[in-house]
Image (cartoon, rainbow, N blue to C red):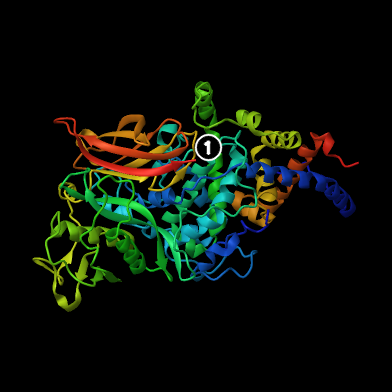
Amino acid sequence: MPSGQLDDAGSPRRGPGGRDAVSPVPLAPSAAQLHLPSHDLPVDPDVAIGELYRAHWHRLVRLAWLLLRDQLAAEDVVQDAFVATHRRWGSIREGGRVVGYLHTAVVNGCRSVQRHNVVVDRVNTATAGAADAPGRESVSSAEAAALHSTEQEAMMRVLAGLPQRQREVLVLRYYADLSEAQIAAALDISPGAVKSHAHRGLMALRATMPMTEQP
Amino acid sequence: MNTDRTPLDPDEVARRKAALRDTEDRLRGALSADAARVDPTDRLAGILTEAHDETSDRARRWLPSAAAAAAALLLAGTVWAVNRPSGTTPVGGPTGASESTVATTPSSPSPSPSTPSASSSAATGRPSTTSVTVSPIVPPGVPPTVPPTAPPTAPPTSGSSPSSTTIALPVYYLGPVVAGSQQLRLFREFVPAGVQLPVTAGGKALAALRLAIAPTGGARSGGYASPWTSADPTSVTVGDGLITVALSRGLRVTPDGGSDLAIQQIVWTVQAAVGKGALPVRITVPGDGELAPGRSSTATWNRPATPLEVSSVLAPVWIDEPFNGEVVRAGQPLVVKGIASTFEASVEWQLLDRGAVVDEGFTTATVGAPGRGAYTFETKALDAGPLVLRVFESSAKDGSVAAEQRVSFTAR
């Protein structure tokens, strides 16, 4: 996983292959910048969303998937984040914290979905017998059906059982490769809290996985 | 929050860090492998459609989170959240502009991005009936088809070169309301188009206009045709309160459907691409000759203002999703969305596999004719292969098909 792809570089990163080298926007000088002057960003929301989409859509959907275990919901959440970004592009552009906004929107969207997962799961249970049941699978069915690797399965199961904050921090840290400061901004918590959630999450993972100990 | 952390000396911190490094590595690997199982479907067209579609009746499932995101950033002291005027919302975007003149839904053309009432009313989660999904998903049991390092699949692009970029533009095509009909109307489709850099409103309008008057097919029986095919648009200039389109020549004979409908095709297309609402449009030809028989090239034009007038210009049935040529997931249902202006808002549909009906149903739009309402429905799980979706209105008189739109797409 190339690190920094989700960094808040203001200007969306170019995708592999240089397809987006056509951007009218100069590349951000440094991945670490959280705020860019708005004149570095496209004015047109259609252009901006197109670029953001090409740079971040896959990654953000996968990020949401890790939090939700439901691809349809993950895509819905990220789509909504892009739509919201488009609709407020003028003001988001002013602030320059574009990808950070997307992160915050995606994490909050995932929480919103999870709050109503009880209802969704009930629907899933009711339709589970149908051969063409839509793939809005619950956590348990997703894991039972799909995780083939024992270690990976165990790891993801433990992760799923962690408190929400710890799970979010671990996913943002070890999948999205965000810095503590970026995670703090995305989750609206202090950097100290990020550290503490990450630490406790990792300890929990290690404690429940005796076989991960090195000889 | 971190009250259970005991103070540690630096050595102890280092020791624990080392001990956790293996867990970190394994977690990284597990997350990466797990995420790679997901092959996100392409939704750029859906995003742009929805972003521009401000009169849509769709439930905004997620608005509370949007509000929360804004609030979080506001607390974090970011600038943009403070001055977040609703005026910066792209008012009168491609569909917003068009539908704001015709929709009878209560939504205003420029809704505030996030209102408290929207937050509370949207707090019903994500009911499956109002899903905003364009494409079915990959079930977790399906092996990943894309390696984790694969570059993101770009939206259906074409013609990307160092001097242009690809944007999905709303394009208004001129075609018969139903195959064989003499009645011509405008059909809106979102089409990926190469736009000259730097992107300007005029550049988008020019690209959309070129697509609109040189239709390249699609699944529509009867197809699209434009009288402007030989009248090459040379420039589109967006000024204060006026869009000026320059054509290489005017029409010498009155086209099928009449000169006014032909002019409306240009008006709707450039207004939507410019995205600033119903700006008047002037269509010039060299030497200030006639734009069409009896139509001056120095006049200004605009879209009609009343639903009844609009219904004589726009086709009764539009399909927004899926779009022509889209590739969707096989083995999953397909969520279809569009706009209809039909008697008692009733909308019928069929899914065709090589001409044979494999699924069908009916639904209703949010409003009936002459208003234009959003509709959505879900097909059964798709079999792989090329498919055609028909959405149509049957005549209340004799059951014949009164209006129809088709898109062809592939389930894979």
Task: Look at mark 1 in the image and give the residue it sits on.
Answer: A113
Q: Residue at x 36, y 41 (%)?
A: B337
Q: Which residue lies furthest to the left in this view?
A: B294
Residue A112 showing in the rendered view = no
Front residue of A162 and B165: B165
Q: In what element is the residue under mark 1? A: helix
Q: Is residue B112 left or right of residue B411?
A: left
Position in image of residue A67 (x %, y %) = 61, 40
Position in image of residue B321 (x %, y %) = 38, 44
The quarter of the displayed image where residue B248 is located: bottom left
Q: Residue at x 76, y 45 (%)?
A: A199
Instruction: Kindly identify which chain the residue marked by label 1 belongs to.
Output: A
The quarter of the displayed image where residue B228 is located: bottom left
Q: Quadrant of the C terminus of chain A?
A: top right
Position in image of residue A15 (x %, y %) = 58, 60
Q: In this view, does B318 lie to the left or right of B38?
A: left
Position in image of residue A4 (x %, y %) = 65, 59
Front residue of B316 and B226: B226
With respect to residue A209, does A93 lie above or below?
below
With respect to residue B198, does B336 lie above or below?
above
